[in-house]
Amino acid sequence: MKVDLNSDLGESFGRYKLGLDEEVMNYITSANVATGWHAGDPIVIRRTVRLAKEKGVAVGAHPGYPDLLGFGRRYMKLSPEEARNYTLYQIGALYAFTRAEGIELQHVKPHGALYNALVKEEELARAVIEGIADFDRNLIFVALSGSRSAEIAEEMGVKVAHEVFADRAYNPDGTLVPRSKPGAVIHEEEAIAERVVSMVKDGGVRAINGEWVELKADSICVHGDNPKAVEIAARIRKVLEEEGVRVVPMREIVR
C-alpha cells in the first residue's frame, strides 16, 4: 500500500513570508509550488524548487486565479480560453525553474478557489485540463478524490491523482466544507492522524454530519500554512509508516 504526501509551498511573496517550507519539506514527497499568480515570485519559486531538489521531493505546478490580494481564494469567472491559457502560462513559469535546476515536473494541482470551482464547473475543468495536456500529457492532474474533474481528466487521457485532505472536514457529497463554516479545518494532530489512516486503509472518512464518504487516496494534502504544519506532517508520516503504508511521490502511484 502506497500514498503520496503533498503540500502547497513557495507561497511567500516579496517581503512577505508564508508557510514553513523548509521544515515541511522534510516529511512530504510532492511539493505544489505557487506560480506567481496567487502567491510566489521568481526568487521564491527558484528557492523552493532548489530546496525540493535537495530534499528529493517531486515538484508540481500550483496555478491559481490572478489574485495576489485575495491569495487565490476568491472566485473569478473565466472563459474556457482564459482558463486553458492561464493554466499553460503558469506551468511554463515553473518549468523554467525546474529545467534550470535539472529536475522534471511531476504534476499540476490547481489552487484554492480555482480547485474548488473545477469540482462544480465541467467546462472550466475541461479547459484547465486542456491547458495541462497542451504542455505535457504525461503530467499528473491532482483532483479532489471522486470528483467530476477527476473523471473528465481520465476521459481525456490525462493521468489523475485522487487527492484527500488530512485537515479538512468533508460534506456528505465528498466536497470540502467551506473554510468560512465552523469545523471546516481540523487542528488536532491525533484526529488528523486517525482520519488519514481511515482514508488510506479503509477507503473513506466520516463527513461533518457523521455519514460515511468513500474516497480514493492517491495523495494526501498537508497544508504548509497551518501553524502546526510541521508537527502534523511529521505525525501523518509516522502513523502511515507504522501502519505499513509506503510514502512515495505520486509518480510511483499514478502510471
Image (spheres, rainbow, N blue to C red):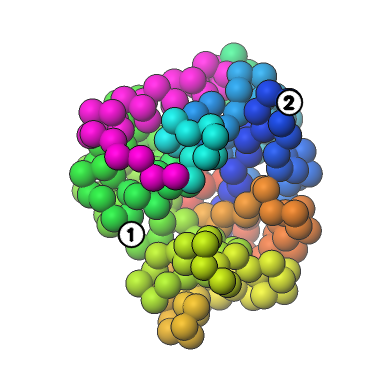
Q: Which of the two marks, 1 or 2, is nearer to us in this view? A: 2
Q: Amino acid at mark 1?
A: Ser
Prevailing secondary structure class for the magenta stretch in the rendered image = helix
Secondary structure under badge 1?
loop
Task: Tell me if residue 77 is in the magenta stretch.
Answer: yes
Give the residue number, with chain letter if any, for mark 2: 15
Report if the CB atoms under discs 1 and 2 are less than 8 Å apart: no
Q: Is residue 247 left or right of residue 209?
A: right
Count the marks: how many? 2
Q: Quadrant of the C terminus?
A: top left
Q: Residues within 10 Å of mark 1 (few under 14, many from 20)?
A: some
Q: Which mark is residue 147?
A: 1
Q: Quadrant of the N terminus?
A: bottom right
Residue furthest to the bottom in view is: 210
Pick the front one: 200 or 77: 77
Pick the front one: 125 or 215: 125
Q: Amino acid at mark 2?
A: Arg
Mark 1 vs 2, N-terminal side: 2
Q: Residue at x 63, y 52 (%)?
A: 223
* Part of the protein shown in magenta: 74-99
Pick the front one: 87 or 18: 18
Secondary structure under badge 2?
loop
Q: Residue at x 53, y 32 (%)?
A: 68
**Where is 199 relative to 209, above or below?**
above
Q: Is residue 130 left or right of residue 136?
A: left
Pick the front one: 235 or 77: 77
